[in-house]
Image: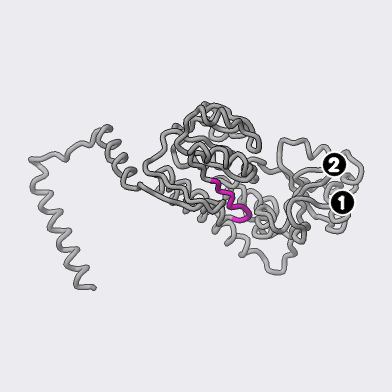
Amino acid sequence: MKKFLKQLTLLGLAGAMLFGTVGCSQQPKEVTGEESAQGQTEQVEKAFPVTITDSTGTEITMTQAPERIVSLAPSTTEILGALGVTDKLVGRTRYCDFPTEALAAEEVGGTSDPNIETIVALNPDLVVASTHVSDEVINKLREVNIPVAFLNEQEDFDGTYSAIENIGLLVGRSKEAEAVVSEMKATVESVVERINNLDEDEVKPRVYYAVWAGDSDSTAGGDTFIGQMIELAGGDNIAKDVEGWSISKEKIVEGDPDMIIIPAGKGLKETLMTTDFYKDLRAVQEGHIYEIDDNMISRQGPRLAQAFEALAQIIHPETK
């Protein structure tokens, strides 16, 4: 092997010397923008046909890169943006607001109640969906031969990574998807390392993530991706034994949280501070209510790693 590497090095040096000799008489060819675009197109074309299996167990095959895409979830819209294909987006839900360029696409309704006729009229080559889209909507679109990739791979980072990689395959942007996932993993690993370097004897703060408060209470149970993020970020989720997103007031009192984390922009802080029951919680009385970007933490897309870092810095400010 060493001999081979030495030969390779000598060949490289020889090539460099030869290039230096002819370099005075021949200038390197300048690559025009048109030629660069052509090269990129050829690279994308080589990626097809491609087939993935979505969360419904259905195989989705694309024979060429889609030119007209409809996104039925804010998370998939963000993924498309991170992959650099927002310009291919012709339809999106009313909740798809990031990146801002996506707002140029036509609104097709909500995530759970999109307008089928509007979507069909947009003549999409591909529809990408997640979470709240019903089987009825998916089936109706498939009945008129519109490819629908339903990627409801929830509850952990791996599911987010998988959704990004699958969408990357479908739109001919696998390399971009790999880069996005790689950057996310690097951020997560960095945060986890900082958490692991904390004093082992330090008691984990008890965390209550309040999605909603009032007549009913909503939180991030232990089987949800936000619940898992709290534990990974060095917190003790008081709802770790809860399934799903509902919690009782008795469970909140029993958990006696050291801090309450809430999605920003919903007026929850005022509710907690002024409403009976909540205002008597120790965390509220001690002023330990913290806000986090709702869109960033609730959408399983490229910004989820940033949300995890923000969450860890709330729970353990010393990791900043």
Q: Is residue 165 left or right of residue 231?
A: left
Q: Is residue 184 visible?
A: no
Q: Amino acid at mark 2?
A: Gly
Q: Residue at the location (61% across, 51% down)?
A: 309
Image x and y of residue 293, in percent: 66, 41
| Label 1 with label 2: CB-CB less than 8 Å | no
Quarter of the image for residue 238 reads bottom right
Q: Is residue 231 left or right of residue 241?
A: left
Q: Whole-Å distance between the Cαs marked 1 and 2? A: 10 Å
Q: Secondary structure at mark 1?
A: helix
Question: Which quadrant does the N terminus fall into?
Answer: bottom left
Q: Residue at the location (47% across, 53% down)?
A: 182
Which label's residue is closer to the chain start, 1 or 2?
Answer: 2
Image x and y of residue 33, in percent: 28, 33
- Rendered image: mark on residue 189: none
Q: Amino acid at mark 1?
A: Lys
Residue pointed to by mark 1: 249
Nearest to the observer: residue 24 or residue 206? 206
Nearest to the observer: residue 201 or residue 50? 50
Magenta-highlighted residues: 150-156
Residue pointed to by mark 2: 214
Q: Residue at the location (20% across, 70% down)?
A: 4
